[in-house]
Each structure stands twice: as structure tokens, then as C-alpha cells.
Amino acid sequence: MTRTSVGRVPDSAVLDTGTGPAVLLLHGTAPGTTAAANFSSLVATLGGYRLLAPDLLGFGASPMPLDLDYGPELWSRQAWQILDDRGIERATLIGNSMGARVALTMALARPHRIRGLVLLSTRMTATSSPAQALLRAYTPSLEGMEQLLRECFVTDQALITPDVVRQRYDASAQPGAHEAMQRVFAGLAATGPGPAPDELAGITAPVMLLHGRDDRIVPSDDGSRLAALLPHADLHVLGGTGHWLQIERAETVNALVTDFLARCAA
């Protein structure tokens, strides 16, 4: 691979299940992230759709080269390649955290191929916080992963079970994962603030924004700022909820997404 190529992502790195209108699920960027874990509840709930949830380059079962410039442009090219390889012309995109930024990048590049956007915990402004510092400082260990999950992702501490910690730790400690994560952080620091307001105002697809009011990684005010720029956006702010809202408030998020997808398909 070169610094500008995507390379072919193995089928083993793409969860591809179901039949019906295509829905592409794009995970966020944090140590130990995988598509299957990030979207487990949604995938189990959404029937009647073809669901594609890839591990983005640098994560999970995807390649983790250290000579790529990681960021939304690279991951959007990977996502388009996955859709093109399968002959999928149009899709609804569900993006979580940085995955939402990837979804917006895709919608701006090829709007005619986007049925709608579901954006969870979307960053709009550059901010710093103890949670963000903890993410960047993480080195693989069970203790470090437990601290990261408890202090960064949820308000409901009962969700951080030994199995959850072990699963995330194992993904973060596989060969090459930590080094790739450091490249990801470096790449994201160089990408800038994201699409300009006038670009976002040109997105005509329906959009649903979801944000946890107690998100320690991406402030919930970012959801309000983004909703004000998108002409066809609905915003849902979930009280008592952190960054992992699709897990912490799975029943609510699943219901909202199910309704939105039905309207997009219609």
C-alpha cells in the first residue's frame, strides 16, 4: 500500500448480512473499536435491510499499515469501494463519532448515492477534555481499557463488564493495532475542523442526529450546531447518556433508527 491507496479490504473485515435496502454502518475511532462490537445492538435489531459494517482501515480485521494518512477521506474511499465491489448504488449511512464525519464526507462527494444519514455523537468543533487525553494516552492493558471505557464512554457503569473490557482490550492489543491507532490520532489531528457550513447546508438528504447529553468525548452542543446547519435534520439529545449512546440507550436508539430507515426506504 502507498500513502494514497486504499488497497482491497478483505471480506472478513466487512460484516455483510441481510437483504433489502443497503445500510452502511461506520464506526468511530478509539482503541479496541470494531464494527461488530460498535453496532451489535443495531445489527441484531434491523431486519429487512442489507447491513454492511466494515472495520475501517487501521481497526479490527482490516489492514493496519503505518504508511497511510488515516482520516475521513481515506475511510470514505474505503467505504465507497466496499459498496462498489458489491454493486450497491444507493445506501443509507449510519455513522458513529468519527464514522459520522466519514458519512458526511461521503454525502458531500456523491449525494445522489445517499438515501439518508444517521449521525451519532458527531464532532463539529475542536475541543480538548480529560476523556480525549485518556484515549490518546492509552497503551494496551486490561486495567487501562477498563479505565478508558468507564471514564470516556458511558454514564451507566454497569455496562462495563469483564467481558466487554476483555473484548476491547484484545482488539486493541492485536499485532499492529496500537501503532496504527497512534497513526490514526496523528492523522485526525491534521485533518482540520471538517466540512464548511456552506457545504453542510447543501446536503439535501434527510438526516437524523443523536447525541448523549453527558458525552465526555464530543460535547452535546456539537449536535445542536450541526443540526442548525443541515436543512433536513432532526436532533435527538438523550439525557443521562454518554458517548456510547447506541449501547447505553440501545432500545431508544434502535427505535429511532428503525423509524428513520423505514421513512428513507419509502
Image (cartoon, rainbow, N blue to C red):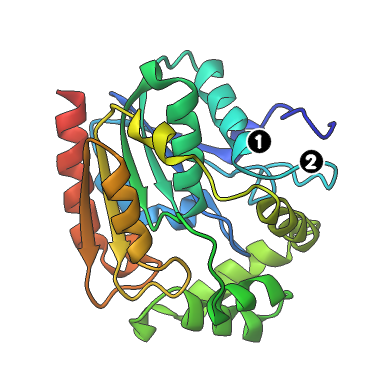
Circles 1 and 2, Cβ within 8 Å, touching? The answer is yes
On residue 74, which mark appears? Answer: 1
Closer to us: 130 or 6:
130
Q: Quadrant for residue 108, please give it.
A: top left
Sequence-first tag of 1 and 2: 2
Q: Position of residue 118 (x, y in %)?
A: 32, 43
Q: Position of residue 212 (x, y in %)?
A: 31, 67
Q: CA distance from mark 1 to mark 2?
A: 8 Å
Against 3, is 214 above or below?
Answer: below
Q: Position of residue 243 (x, y in %)?
A: 40, 67
Q: Amino acid at mark 2?
A: Leu
Q: Quadrant for residue 200, please give it.
A: top left
Closer to us: 53 or 182:
182
On residue 68, which mark appears? Answer: 2
Q: Is residue 119 left or right of residue 28?
A: left
Is disc 2 placed on a helix, strand or loop?
loop
Q: Amino acid at mark 1?
A: Leu
Against 249, is 113 above or below?
Answer: above
